[in-house]
Image (cartoon, rainbow, N blue to C red):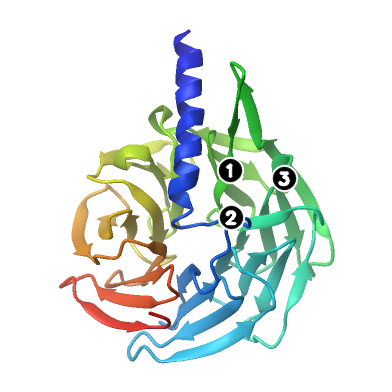
Amino acid sequence: MTSTTNRQTSLALGVAFSAILCVAHCTASEPRPGRVSGLRFMHDGKIVSSNYDGTVRQWDSRSGDEKRLFHGREVIYDQDANDIGDIVVSGPKAVTLACVKSNCEHSLRLTARSEDSPLRVAVGPTGRRIVGGYVGDDLSLAVWKSPFHEPNGRIVIGPSEVELDGSKYTTNIARVLFGLDDSIIIAAVIGQGVMVYDVDSGGIKALLQPLQRDVVDVCLARGTRRLIVVASSGVVRGYDAGKWTNEWEQRYKGDYVSCAANDASSVFALAGADGIIRVIESSGGKEIATIDTKAKRISAIAISEDGTQVAIGDRDGSVTLWSVENGQRIWQGGAK
């Protein structure tokens, strides 16, 4: 009886947090043109953002000057990039490789399941593999290997609708990302936990379920080899991104909609539903800075390599850069 009650509670939380996560990751049925759907600090200090209007932009972190890199015809649900300049976005029915090694005149559409849309996307650190997270009759991952003609594999995660005691509950993919290299895929699934997969075999290597709470988001701090798992009620855990063992756990005040880490940084950032940004050491969970952005509609977040700056995207299309040291706004650009 207790097990059934816990499962029902977890699934019900999944529904609730699906609504919360729409602040950060709105689905295909609720398009908001202009909303910032993805942010990333690049190795050269530039910031790349994607918007629901199909535009990928680059921002100068010093001046806030904006440059349009790519403009597609479709809504962008999610974005990922790596340090060599590959940028991928997901939209209706396809993953688009928008920029290859900073060449943004090139684009390639990758289609795995024509009837469904990939709501989540990730590109490996070497650019040789891409993964799209699909939501349809079931939740699944499609994996492409360079030269990206056809998907090289499909990993089924589980059903997108679960029936329990006569009631139906939905699950969703909150995030997909690659591990320390492109041989591992990590998928955070609302209502199920965090699943770690071997790309070549499609086999599951680990299942992480933080305190039976619902998973909100995950991010990977490669510099400290820590997978950060953000759960409901402000619970955050740091896992060893190789052994998949829990190394630390903290509970921070508030509810959080997204997290961000950088490949070279030793810290990560949490975006709160109340506009509070917390910057935290990834090795042990110590909080080092709090920024009150007063933003109530944060839709994306990124942190710089040196951990001194945090960028947030808003549902109105604006991008704002903040100083971690003094908590002050450096610049704001885009729609207001």
Give the residue furthest to the top: 1
Q: Residue at x 45, y 42 (%)?
A: 17
Q: Quadrant of residue 266?
A: bottom left
- CA gap between label 3 and label 1 equals 10 Å
Q: Is residue 151 above or below residue 109?
A: above
- Estimate how packed mark 1 is, as few (under 14), some (14 to 19) or many (20 or more) residues with alpha carbons within 10 Å: many
Element under label 3?
Answer: loop
Residue 136's tag is 3
Crowd class of label 2 (few under 14; some 14 to 19; many from 20; radius 10 Å):
many
- Choose top left, top right, bottom left or bottom right for residue 150: bottom right
Q: Looking at the image, is mark 3 or mark 2 earlier in the sequence?
A: 2
Q: Earlier in the sequence, mark 2 or mark 1?
A: 2
Query: What residue appears at the point 43 percent right and 48 percent down from the top-left corner?
Result: 20
Closest to the observer, 230 or 265: 230
Residue at mark 1: 172
Crowdedness of circle 3 by 10 Å Cα count: few (<14), some, many (20+)? some
Contact flag, marks 2 and 1 (Cβ < 8 Å) = yes
Q: Quadrant of the C terminus?
A: bottom left
Q: Which residue is mark 2?
A: 27
Is residue 217 shown to the viewer in this render? Answer: no
Marks 2/1: CA–CA distance: 10 Å
* Residue 255 seen from this side: yes
